[in-house]
Image (cartoon, grey):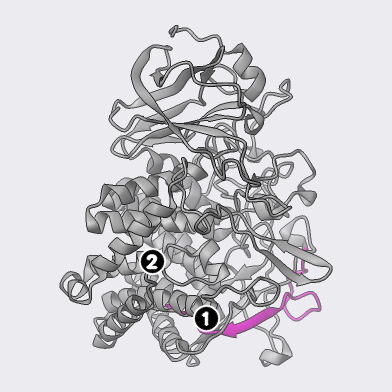
């Protein structure tokens, strides 16, 4: 191949401009991020191109942020033309001067559902360059037919993924703050949260604060607790990479969320209010949804109440780092409520999986596994915080329950919500237990259980992307959530599924010293950051091709609905239920964009941060 590449025909297909990428006018109104730095300008798709990268017949798919020096490094050639074949069984990496620095082998892989109704009409070749360990900026290139193909540029460096993404992903929560003024963008909003409905006792609760959960303005304690836990985990497990000032900012953000959980807690009852919920009708400035005066008619109402083991875990974790006694008190009370409710079957307060979603065989067992895994995380934090032997006793009980519930194939039962959002949590909780309770974990047999879990996931992740699918032979969640006959909730994109799995794979890989687990974890991260069939980097503010629009009722970049550091729901199945990838990549107005793929959501960022922390610790 020539060192100097003629990219003209490739550019006509993908919109990539040579080795660089066109930058649009500054985004986010020039505001600094939550961590004080000026935000990078977001790469744009050249306006003179009629095709976007997701539409190209030929693509070299890469992690558009880059690869860790010590991690596994893979690219994929995707071909959507039956007549085209690679000219050779090799690919090359070139540096910024277009000099070839590495040559690797292309390996042909099967397509997805090849020859069946849900065939993706694509063929794949894998190229591995894990042995290449020179820091720098590179592109991959190869010949397909008469086309000389190049990838988006990417970087290789030590701790690269962490350094490029941790602050940005954590900073997303700052932009989502409720009851907080962001200078130049909006005043403090929803200062009248929240009205207690009569069925919950009536009156008013000071529920100011917390985070707007997604592209809407509602607040969910059952989701915010995972975000708090993730931020604390990032701050304590990755302190050496963050630096003192940045670590403090992240802990401050965790405390912001913890304060909201503390307000939602009902002292002495072992429960908290679930949501501040006002529906999905309002669009615009969040400070103008209500008058901000408590006791008037537009106060947003609370919805639901109940136990939350994960809130106990989050508050205990923040108490360890901050020493705040009120968090410890709330965590211990919520722990008592979670233990008392463990045997009671209750569906999620906001996802009724039996109402319109085909019930899975594992629904009841899956909910029990989810609550048990969360209680195990709470026990680990409270044991560390207090040293009270009751938490060590409860730790063992939770582990024994999870081991008993493990299926013969190595997986844990899941209800529909757990499988699509929290899939990696049981294995991650057991791995964290094994890491801190070595001898006891050996006696209980957690390592063999985690080996069985890993082995099953290795078998399931057999596609070229090495992604853990929804089920054996089913790539994407096929279910639709039906609220009533007039309104449909399509299955969400599964970025939380992949990222929670990445968290678990890094933890299990480090525990078992099995590099195959780390490889799977790397691939789940790669999928989110660009190595997917749509060539789409699903982290706003990084990568070369981001979603043109996000569903968000208010955002710093209002035209696109884009929030710095946002991770959207992700790629899902087609609306006709065919198991082929769909993400709305269009220029439709933000209010009309498909929420099930484009809307950002707290859990995606939370699990990304947990995966980052676990990956660095395993490394």
Distance of mark 2 from mark 1, alpha carbons? 18 Å
Instruction: Tell me which corner region of the image, top left, top right, bottom left or bottom right, holds residue 283.
Output: bottom right
Res 453 visible: yes
Residue 571 among those drawn in magenta = no
Q: How many marks?
A: 2
Q: Earlier in the sequence, mark 2 or mark 1?
A: 1
Crowd rating for badge 2 (residues with CA inside 10 Å; few <14, some 14–19, many 20+): few
Q: Position of residue 12 (x, y in %)?
A: 66, 18
Q: Residue at x 49, y 65 (%)?
A: 422
Q: Is residue 490 above or below residue 333?
A: above
Can you identify the residue that label 2 sits on?
Answer: 409
Query: Is 565 in front, or is 142?
Result: 142
**Number of the front mark, 2 or 1:** 2
**Which element is circle 2 on?**
loop
Q: Is residue 247 visible?
A: no
x and y percentages locating residue 146 in the rendered image: 56, 12
Residue drawn at the location 80% of the way across and 64% of the way down: 281
- Crowding at dot 1, Cα within 10 Å, few <14 / some 14-19 / many 20+, comes out as some
Residue toward you, 151 or 161: 151
- Say whether marks 2 and 1 touch (CB < 8 Å): no
Note whether 96 is above or below 324 in the view shown: above
Give residue 191's position: percent from left, percent from top.
Answer: 68, 70
Name the side, left or right, on which 407 lies relative to 286: left
Judging by the rendered image, the residue that carries numbered circle 1 is 364
Q: Which residue extends farthest left?
A: 439
Residue at the right extreme, as displayed: 486
Residues in magenta, as a range: 289-312
């Amino acid at each position: 191949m020539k060192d100097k590449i003629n990219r003209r025909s490739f550019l006509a297909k993908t919109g990539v401009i040579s080795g660089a990428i066109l930058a649009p006018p500054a985004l986010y109104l020039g505001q600094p991020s939550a961590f004080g730095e000026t935000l990078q300008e977001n790469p744009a798709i050249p306006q003179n191109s009629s095709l976007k990268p997701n539409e190209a017949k030929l693509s070299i798919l890469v992690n558009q942020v880059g690869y860790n020096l010590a991690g596994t490094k893979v690219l994929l050639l995707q071909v959507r033309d039956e007549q085209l074949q690679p000219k050779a069984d090799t690919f090359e990496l070139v540096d910024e001067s277009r000099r070839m620095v590495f040559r690797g082998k292309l390996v042909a892989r099967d397509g997805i559902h090849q020859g069946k109704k849900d065939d993706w009409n694509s063929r794949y070749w894998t190229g591995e360059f894990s042995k290449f360990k020179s820091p720098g900026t590179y592109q991959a290139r190869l010949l397909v037919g008469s086309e000389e193909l190049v990838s988006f540029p990417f970087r290789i460096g030590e701790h690269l993924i962490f350094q490029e993404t941790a602050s940005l992903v954590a900073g997303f929560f700052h932009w989502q703050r409720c009851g907080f003024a962001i200078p130049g963008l909006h005043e403090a909003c929803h200062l009248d949260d929240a009205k207690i409905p009569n069925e919950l006792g009536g009156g008013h609760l000071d529920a100011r604060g917390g985070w707007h959960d997604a592209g809407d303005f509602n607040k969910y304690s059952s989701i915010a607790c995972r975000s708090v836990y993730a931020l604390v985990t990032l701050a304590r497990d990755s302190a050496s990479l963050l630096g003192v000032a940045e670590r403090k900012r992240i802990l401050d953000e965790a405390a912001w969320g913890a304060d909201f959980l503390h307000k939602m807690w009902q002292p002495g009852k072992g429960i908290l209010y679930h949501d501040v919920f006002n529906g999905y009708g309002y669009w615009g400035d969040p400070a103008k949804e209500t008058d901000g005066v408590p006791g008037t008619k537009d106060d947003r109402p609370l919805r639901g109440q109940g136990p939350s083991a994960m809130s106990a875990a989050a508050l205990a974790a923040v108490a360890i780092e901050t020493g705040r006694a009120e968090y410890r008190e709330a965590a211990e009370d919520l722990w008592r409520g979670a233990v008392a409710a463990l045997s009671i079957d209750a569906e999620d307060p906001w996802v009724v999986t039996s109402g319109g979603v085909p019930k899975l065989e594992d629904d009841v067992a899956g909910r029990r596994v989810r609550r048990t895994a969360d209680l195990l995380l709470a026990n680990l934090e409270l044991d560390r915080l207090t040293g009270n032997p009751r938490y060590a006793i409860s730790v063992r009980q939770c582990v024994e329950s999870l081991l008993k519930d493990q299926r013969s194939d190595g997986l844990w039962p899941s209800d529909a919500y757990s499988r699509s959002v929290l899939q990696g949590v049981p294995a991650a909780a057991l791995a964290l237990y094994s890491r801190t309770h070595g001898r006891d974990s050996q006696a209980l047999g957690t390592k063999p259980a985690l080996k069985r879990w890993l082995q099953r996931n290795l078998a399931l992740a057999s596609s070229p992307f090495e992604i853990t699918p929804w089920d054996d032979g089913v790539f994407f969640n096929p279910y639709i959530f039906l609220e009533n006959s007039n309104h449909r909730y399509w299955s969400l994109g599964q970025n939380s599924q992949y990222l929670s799995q990445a968290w678990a794979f890094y933890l299990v890989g480090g525990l078992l010293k099995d590099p195959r687990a780390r490889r799977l974890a790397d691939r789940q991260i790669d999928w989110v950051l660009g190595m997917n069939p749509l060539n789409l980097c699903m982290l706003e503010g990084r990568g070369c091709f981001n979603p043109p629009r996000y569903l968000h009722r208010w955002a710093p970049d209002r035209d696109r609905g884009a929030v710095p550091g946002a991770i959207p729901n992700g790629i899902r199945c087609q609306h006709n239920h065919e198991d082929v990838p769909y993400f709305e990549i269009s220029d439709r107005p933000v209010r009309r964009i498909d929420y099930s793929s484009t809307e950002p959501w707290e859990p995606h960022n939370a699990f990304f941060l947990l995966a980052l922390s676990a990956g660095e610790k395993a490394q």
